[in-house]
Image (tube, grey):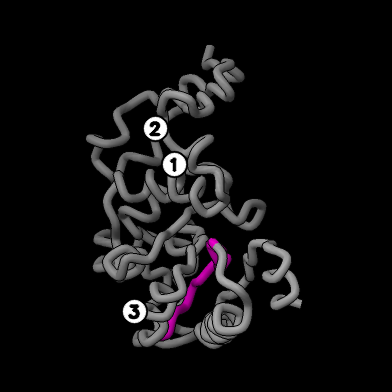
Amino acid sequence: WALDADKNKLQLSIHAIGDKANSWVLDLYRKIVETNPRWERRFRIEHAQHIAPEDFSRLYGLDVNVAVQPYHAIDDGRWAEKRIGKERCKTTYPFRTFLDKGIRMCFGSDWTVAPLNPLLGIYAAVTRRTLDGKNPDGWFPEQKITIKEAIEAYTINNAYAAFEENEKGSISVGKLADFVVLSQDLITIDPTQIENINVEMTVVGGKIVYQKQ
């Protein structure tokens, strides 16, 4: 079915969490590339949670967009090592490694499983402070990313992965005026305080759809 979908130029976005599942999806994507005519596929993997070290180069080589949910890192980080061991956790929610390897990373929430609020996702990605308070410097802190990188993952990277980068994803002339006004400067704030930021206004398509009273 995946080969047929690709032949008909349907973008493939496959759900994979475990390292074995992600490897299997990459095997499938490689087979598709080797079998079907070339076109701009923009493959996606939803979650891409646990990655085998040897698969980062394959993600890059196949130009796969990884659609991950950063909040899960500070939730699952409380117990993941007990389930899969510390060594495998080194490449679990590997945000920094994805970016350093040139892999395009997109952020989402996985709502209703996790909170919908993207500010909490940004907080999770840049602090990696687990919900139990036991990792104040971050759970596997080497995988933390910058606030700017997290914003890009929620905006322009998502738009690209959906073939919508010419319509949305950045505040630019000719694009949809979709943006929020926040109570504090997201770029300069202490990352540990991001979860306390409030939304003052929401604009969709140039129209104010929410304004704090």
Quick check: marks 2 and 1 in contact, CB under 8 Å? Answer: yes
Q: Viewer-proximal residue, 30 or 145?
A: 30
Eye-nearest disc, 2 or 1: 1
For the residues labelled 1 and 3, the Cα–Cα distance comes to 24 Å
From the viewer's side, name the closer residue of 117 and 158.
158
Q: Which mark is residue 90?
A: 3
Which residue is rendered at x = 55% and y = 83% of the image? 34
Relative to 163, 143 lies left or right: left
The location of residue 147, given as percent across then percent down, is 30, 46
Left or right of residue 23: residue 186: left
- Per the image, is 43 magenta? yes
Nearer the observer: mark 2 or 3; the answer is: 3
Q: Is residue 113 above or below residue 212?
A: below
The residue most toward the front is 37
What is the span of residues highlighted in magenta in the rendered image?
40-52
Cα separation, mark 2 vs mark 1, equals 8 Å
Sequence-wise first label, 2 or 3: 3
Along the viewing direction, whichever of 101 and 36 lies nearer the viewer: 36
Under circle 3, the secondary element is loop
Residue denoted by label 1: 119
Q: Earlier in the sequence, mark 1 or mark 3?
A: 3
Helix, strand, or loop for circle 2?
loop
The residue pinned by badge 2 equals 197
Q: Quadrant of residue 46?
A: bottom right
Kindly identify the amino acid type of the residue bearing the numbered disc 2.
Answer: Ile
Judged left or right of residue 108, residue 85 is left
Q: Residue at x 28, y 59 (%)?
A: 136
